[in-house]
Amino acid sequence: MADIARLAGVSVATVSRAMAGSSLVSQENKERVASAVRQTGYVVNQVARGLRLQRSGLVLVMVPSIANPFFAHVLLGIEEALQEAGFGMLVANTGDDHAREDVLARSMLTGGKTEGLILLTGHCPDSLRDEPQAKGRIVAVSEEIAGQGIPSVTIDNAAAMREATAHLIGLGHRRIAHLAGPAGNGLTVQRLAGFHAAMREAGLPVPRGMVGGGAFTIQAGEEGMSRLLARQAPPTAVVCANDEIAIGAIKAARERGIPVPAGMSVVGFDDIDVARAVHPGLTTIRQPRQDLGREAARMLLALLAGEAVVRNLCLPTQMILRASTAPPS
Amino acid sequence: MADIARLAGVSVATVSRAMAGSSLVSQENKERVASAVRQTGYVVNQVARGLRLQRSGLVLVMVPSIANPFFAHVLLGIEEALQEAGFGMLVANTGDDHAREDVLARSMLTGGKTEGLILLTGHCPDSLRDEPQAKGRIVAVSEEIAGQGIPSVTIDNAAAMREATAHLIGLGHRRIAHLAGPAGNGLTVQRLAGFHAAMREAGLPVPRGMVGGGAFTIQAGEEGMSRLLARQAPPTAVVCANDEIAIGAIKAARERGIPVPAGMSVVGFDDIDVARAVHPGLTTIRQPRQDLGREAARMLLALLAGEAVVRNLCLPTQMILRASTAPPS
DNA sequence: GGCCAATCTGCAATCGATTACAGTTCTTGT
DNA sequence: ACAAGAACTGTAATCGATTGCAGATTGGCC
């Protein structure tokens, strides 16, 4: 900047003001500065600027797995909203490693490298529990964080899963199983609760062993379905905690000669891109993935700007009927 | 840091040195500093540190779409390698908007916010063309960048596609079509070239209209296949530029009553997660997605450390035979 | 001419670290 | 007792911006 000042024959203060478009600088000097900038290709140093202004223009996003197509779309929404506001998105893939989340959160948020934090992990790093610096700089998406007053953007998982289960009950199914996600995960718990609620409302039993699963993966779906089919009285329908599980479940059923939906109905959750392209087309619950991310980012930006925000924004889901469900034969 | 110094009864210089573990500080003072840090929960300001050291510890990754499952896995590999080296990953979703790439690259790389740049876009922003600051700080992945001496980590797209096509020819197919990616895209061009090479080697014609496509999406696959099936002499096999196109193509074929692979063989490219779970299991070319990312990040880190790197690292692909291909009926 | 207001402009402090260089204290050998 | 050297420690410059405050210039008006 000193070079520019020399070249334009003004002081660094004038250069700084001219580049910020301040009305304090005369038109003539603005032009001299602009010309010098053009000549040299000067670009302001963002780090120095950040130090002075105490702003980095960055937000950290912690996500269990970037490769998960659901999270990937949430990230897309976040990036879009941040980009719009001139912010950058720093992504950390934590793989549920809490120790790493802890270290990272501290160095990033407390260390001034990032101004805010968006959590897709459903878990707030201990190191930020009572860090005053972190107050009002964190937002949770997809999964709410218990008892810490952290604002969040979510869907009503229990209600959505109840709707999915009710759909199967409405078709006439009585023996319905649930393939859940990883134990301990908040989404798993809520979706499981929705399943149980719908079954209870219909007065249907959920025998031991009719709830399986353990991961949000295709493989878990295959294994879960295999186990269900090995029962003496296998279910006639399965409602899965996400689409990957459902796709795996359908694969396992087909491999054992059971046609979907004729011999087995399957419902997914999320409506990932391939859900409509697999055979049979997957009946599922559509989440507004990108909107979740966008709203979370906007909420964080509002928070950083000192505005008030709603405590928990709950976006609507939509049941998508395709070809993987039918009345029991 | 001044507070810590006061609390520990030493100077800021000693605090700084103590925290860096310098051998110049006495054991006693190190302990006093450590204790003061523990008491206050002090964390060093990364921005100030970055300004002084001229390092931000950040790398910018530009990607056309985060939501693309192939790119998502490349990002995973990049993040893993960066994390290991204590670097952070800034992700920008460019959606092929070159103007935005330009602005972003300048402010990030030239503005000192990031130390390096990884391009998944197949395109180097003009603003960096002859920016000396950018020299030796850029690496391309997946898609090479023509004529600018930018090191890259890629696969041999043409060879892989030739192998895929040759597989179909080996099964006895003669009328083989290709559903390509977006026009102008480097991968599209290379994969198309591989397809033509294989056909030429086998002495097979590629009539006009037997090359379709236009996007790396499920929908493009559906439309492409529909168009092929409307021909007087439809192909007996289709080799697709990626897995999404292939999945869409299979869907369109089935909807028109043509069974895959009995009535139509289909080959994909990438081996995304669902490729093995769809029905029929997709025959495809596996790319080492995560390795591509990891190697690119390592290459960039080596570059930043001033080490010499190979100009273009080419990783091996692998043909995965599943159930979507069979001899023509 | 003299005074005031309006309009710029520049000096220097500031953000929070790192580190060269100079200074202090303590050992040790003679 | 004193010099030399070892082992720390502290002062202040530095990284590259932004901005409060004071000073300079200009124009208008009586």
Image (cartoon, coloured by chain):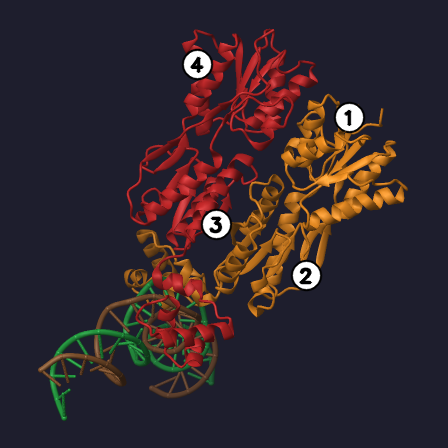
Chain colours: A orange, B red, C brown, D green
Q: Is residue B58 left or right of residue B177?
A: left
Front-most of B99 and B84? B84
SS for callout 3 = strand
SS for callout 2 = loop
Q: Amino acid at mark 3?
A: Leu
Q: Is residue A314 left or right of residue B88?
A: right
State which chain disc 1 sits on.
A
Judge whether A100 appears above or below A234 on screen.
Answer: below
Residue furthest right as drawn: A203
SS for callout 1 = loop
Residue A223 badge: none
As measured in the structure, the alpha-carbon distance from the residue carrying label 1 to the one carrying label 2 is 44 Å
Q: Which residue is mark 4?
A: B198
Q: Count residues near mark 4 (Cα–Cα under 10 Å), then give few for <14, some for 14-19, many for 20+.
A: many
Q: Which residue is mark 2?
A: A309
SS for callout 4 = helix
As measured in the structure, the alpha-carbon distance from the residue carrying label 2 to the one carrying label 4 is 60 Å
Q: Count residues near mark 1 (Cα–Cα under 10 Å), then give few for <14, some for 14-19, many for 20+.
A: many
